[in-house]
Amino acid sequence: MQPKLKALLVDDETKILQNLQAVLPWERLGIHVVGHAGNGLQALSAVKASNPDVILCDIRMPVMDGIDFLRELRLYGSKAKVIMLTGYQEFEYARSVIKYEVREYFLKPIDYDELEGLLFDIAQEIRSPGTLVMQKPHAAARGIDCKRAGAMLMAFAKEYIDAHLSSDLGINDIADYLNISPSYFAILFKQCYSKTFLEYVTSKRLELAKTYLLSSDVSITQIGKMVGYEDRRYFTKVFQKHTGMIPSEFREKGRLLNEA
């Protein structure tokens, strides 16, 4: 029988600590909870005392928050797998910890079934590094799950894209904004939304272009620029490829339908 792994739970809300301890099947996962901490400073002391393998840590805490704790954790030399508990509103905080090797982001409110599946995967990774992780049946097909890892990043990526459709937008721009590599961003985006970054941007731009064509008298050249296509010929080519009509035909057909 393999020795139990050690876990540390860090959150300033006592109720969350109690739920994490009580709801998750630690025994079945082969993990022993070695301690609780209410802030990063307490967590550092616990790390030095018990050397945990897995740490579940909130981001916003008094005295020392999750970001500072994570930085100090890595400076101390701990290789513990860290799951950061966070919310969408804490994105600017969360993206600054990517360089400190966060294993996964987990969004609040906590889905304990999903968290159990994640802990199962992490336990296997620790016990058998470099081997293919076999997922639990109820957690099949999670991969990079949009309820957890990458969800916050991709939600903010979408917001950024939608707000910058008229600009010359590329993968490198989004990756820089998120503070992650372009290749990692491309993988996350495709797995979360089942389409590539370019496919998503093109579809959003054309949706917007259709709205402008049907609801305004703005020139096609200007509409193209408004949705990110500086060159009218290229805009027309893309529009025709995806709709079967050039923009002027689409506008005319739309107006005829409205008059009918």
Image: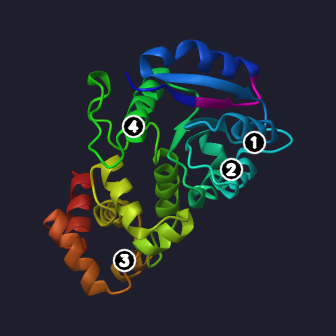
Q: Label 1: which residue? A: 44
* 1 or 3: tag closer to the N-terminus: 1
| SS label for mark 3 | helix
Camera-nearest label, 4 or 3 = 4
Label 4 and label 3: CA atoms lie apart by: 54 Å
Camera-nearest label, 1 or 3 = 1
Label 2 and label 4: CA atoms lie apart by: 21 Å
Q: Are marks 4 and 1 in contact (CB under 8 Å)?
A: no
* 4 or 1: tag closer to the N-terminus: 1
Q: State whether residue 235 is above or below residue 201.
A: below
Q: Label 4: which residue? A: 127
Query: Residue 224 has which mark?
Result: 3
* 2 or 3: tag closer to the N-terminus: 2
Q: Amino acid at mark 1?
A: Leu
* 2 or 4: tag closer to the N-terminus: 2
- Location of residue 124 in the rendering, given as x and y in whole percent from the top left corner: 37, 35
- Location of residue 115 in the rendering, given as x and y in whole percent from the top left corner: 47, 28
